[in-house]
């Protein structure tokens, strides 16, 4: 059986400016260095048991990269929350994957439900973004998930299939297996305080893994990490993480403060 390194990823959304980012990493540095559980977390990262990721706003990336390297001794990888697929040009307000890499990012979140539903990003646009990310040096964390109305009408699996089949259209399975992580984030559970039950989260993640196996084969299905996201807190993270097909967490609100993020990391140890 393939052992997949768990990813504990914090998506700060539009929170934590430069000063707050510095404070967050100072607290995490103290936790890794002086707290017994924090030391265990640092050892778990070094041994490849877990990966810790933080996705700050664009203006905080430089501070996060510098703090993660110096104080946190590369125990935390920095992610962007979004990127455009073109390399450069007349795309006001956008940032390219290459620019994020140059800024020190290692990951990029794509297709987050707020990008899809607040900013109108389509499956077609996300296909281009994922294709560009897969050939960049960044590791994409690609988000999928259904609306409440879709879940209530029994369409969850159809929605996941549609979003993923479009996203990885014409994609090479080996590349996908090597680089992709998928985050299952039911839209109705994001920022609402409603978490999917561990069973529902497991069922959706197992469905995604079967879809990968059917499309790209068992090797890809065994390698690709599938995370759950949606109102994850310290109290519910252990139950979600013990599910067979769940390889980590994408955390919004509870990742903004170092203390609650550290408690969620603790649940993964
Ligand atoms: C998210 O932003 O990806 C998320 C899951 O948010 P929250 O944990 O706040 O629901």
Image (cartoon, helix red, strand yellow):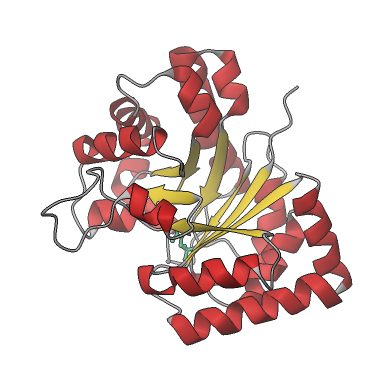
Q: Nearer the viewer, residue 210 or 124?
A: 124
**Residue 168 in sight:** yes
**Would residue 232 be found to the left or right of residue 40 on screen?**
left
At a point 56% along the width and 30% down the height, the residue shown is: 224
**Residue 255 in sight:** no
> Which of the 4 image quarters holds residue 126?
top left
The residue sitting at the front extreme is 102
> Where does residue 159 sit, x and y in percent of width and height?
32, 34
> Which of the 4 image quarters holds residue 33?
bottom right
> Where does residue 220 sit, x and y in percent of width and height?
55, 21
At a point 30% along the width and 19% down the height, the residue shown is: 170
Above or below — where is 240 with respect to 124?
below
At a point 76% along the width and 45% down the height, the residue shown is: 49
User: Could you tell me which quadrant the N terminus lies in?
Assistant: top right
Q: Nearer the viewer, residue 55 or 112?
A: 55
> Which of the 4 image quarters holds residue 48?
top right
User: Could you tell me which quadrant the C terminus lies in?
Assistant: bottom right
Q: Nearer the viewer, residue 117 or 94?
A: 94
> Where does residue 218 sit, x and y in percent of width and height?
58, 14
């Amino acid at each position: 059986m393939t052992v997949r390194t768990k990813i504990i990823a914090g998506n700060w959304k539009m929170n934590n400016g430069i000063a707050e980012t510095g404070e967050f990493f100072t607290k995490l540095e103290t936790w890794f260095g002086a707290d017994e559980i924090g030391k265990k977390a640092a050892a778990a990262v070094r041994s490849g048991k877990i990966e810790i990721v933080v996705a700050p706003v664009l203006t905080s990336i430089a501070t996060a990269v510098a703090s993660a390297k110096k104080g946190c001794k590369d125990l935390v990888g920095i992610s962007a929350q979004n990127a455009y697929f073109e390399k450069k040009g007349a795309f006001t307000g956008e940032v390219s994957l290459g620019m994020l890499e140059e800024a020190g990012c290692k990951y990029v979140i794509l297709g987050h439900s707020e990008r899809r539903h607040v900013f109108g990003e389509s499956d077609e646009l996300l296909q281009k973004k994922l294709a560009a990310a897969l050939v960049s040096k960044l590791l994409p964390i690609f988000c999928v998930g259904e609306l409440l109305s879709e879940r209530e009408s029994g369409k969850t699996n159809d929605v996941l299939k549609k979003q993923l089949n479009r996203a990885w259209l014409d994609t090479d399975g080996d590349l996908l297996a090597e680089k992709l992580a998928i985050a299952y984030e039911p839209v109705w559970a994001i920022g609402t305080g409603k978490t999917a039950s561990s069973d529902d989260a497991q069922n959706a993640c197992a469905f995604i893994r079967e879809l990968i196996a059917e499309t790209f084969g068992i090797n890809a299905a065994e390698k690709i990490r599938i995370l759950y996201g949606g109102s994850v807190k310290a109290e519910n993270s252990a139950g979600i993480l013990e599910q067979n097909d769940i390889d980590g967490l994408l955390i919004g609100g509870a990742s903004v403060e170092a203390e609650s993020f550290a408690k969620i990391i603790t649940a993964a140890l």
